[in-house]
Image: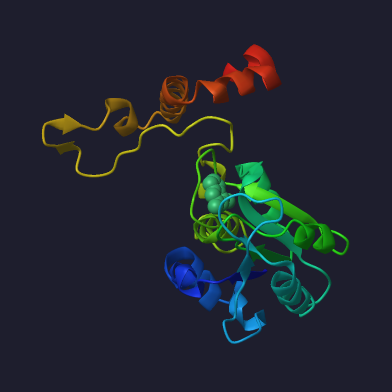
Amino acid sequence: MRIDVVTIFPGYLAPLDEALVGRARRAGLLDVRVHDLRRWASGVHKAVDDSPYGGGPGMLMTAPVWGAALDEVTGSGVGVPRLLVPTPAGAPLTQRRAAGWASEPWLVLACGRYEGIDARVLSDAARRMPVEEVSLGDYVLAGGEVAALVVVEAVSRLVPGVLGNPASAELDSFSDGLLEAPAYTRPERWRDLDVPDVLRGGNHAAVDRWRRDRSLERTAAVRPDLLDALVARHGAAAFD
Ligand code: 6GU
C-alpha cells in the first residue's frame, strides 16, 4: 500500500520511521512518502496562506498551492488515490473507517494548518477522486499532522503482514464494539497484587467468560455510549 502525506512540517512525520510503521516500510509492505507543501509555493516568501474572504481570525491555506501539490502527487502513480483530509470538521475516525482504508491501494493525506484549506481545493479534487474529511474527536489540534500519524498507524496495522500476529487485530477494543478486558503477564504476584486466579486455571471457557464480563464492566463505566450502540444493533443478543 502507498501513502503520501503533504504537509508544511515534514519533520512532524518523523515517527513514521519508527516501530510498527517503520518496520513495515523497510519490509516493503508500506510505501510512505512525505512531501513538503512549500515545494509548490512560489515567490520569494513561498507563502502558503492568506486571509479569509468574509473576514474572521487567522489565515487559510491557498487553493493554487494545494492544487499544484495535489495535481502532482495524485498524478504520480497508478490509478487515483483516496484523498483524506484531517480536520476537526470531518467525520469521526473509527475502526470501521480505518479497516475500509486498509484495503485501498493508495491514500493521500493533506495536512492543513492555520484555519484550514480553501474549500475549493476539496471540491476540485472530488471531481477526480474520492475525498473524505476525517476528525480524531471533539477537540482542536494546531494542524492535521498528528491526525495523519494516527490515521497512518491505525490503517497500517490492518494491512496484511504488518502485524506479527493478525489475531491481535481481531481481539482489539472496538472490533466487537466493547473495550478490552485488563491483561496480565509474569510475575504472578507483584507488590502484593495477584494475577486473577481464573487466568491461571487453564479453563478457556471460564477465561473467555471472565474477559467478556470485565469488558462489559469497563465499557459500562467509561463508554456507556458503546453499550447503547451494541444494544441498538443486536438487542439483548449482544450479551450472549
Ligand atoms: Cl483531524 N485536525 C485538527 N486540526 N484538529 C483536530 C482534528 C484534526 N481532530 C480533532 N481535532
Quadrant containing the N terminus in the rendered view: bottom right
Q: Residue furthest left?
A: 191
Q: Residue furthest top?
A: 236
Q: Position of residue 227 (x, y in %)?
A: 56, 21
Tell whether 83 sits left or right of 136: right
Asked whether 72 or 217 is in front, the reply is 72
Q: Is residue 129 above or below residue 98?
A: below
Q: Of residues 109 and 174, which is closer to you in this image?
A: 109
Asked if residue 151 shows in the view, the reply is yes
The reply, left or right, for residue 111 in relation to residue 211 is right
Give the side of residue 143 with respect to residue 108, left or right: left
The quarter holding residue 118 reads bottom right
**Which image quadrant is residue 44 in?**
bottom right
Residue positioned most to the front:
55
Res. 240 in view = no
The residue under the point 28% across, 43% down is: 185
In the rendered image, residue 191, in percent from the top left (x then y), is placed at 11, 36
Image coords of residue 39 (percent x, y): 62, 83
Q: Quadrant of the C terminus?
A: top right
Q: Nearer the viewer, residue 161 or 70?
A: 70
Q: Is residue 75 above or below residue 184?
A: below
**Relative to the observer, which residue lies in front, 104 or 50?**
50
Q: Is residue 67 above or below residue 178?
A: below
Estimate the x, y position of residue 190 in percent, counting from the top left. 15, 38
Colour convention: rainbow
Label count reads 0
Residue ranking furthest to the bottom? 44
Which residue: 53% across, 70% down? 24
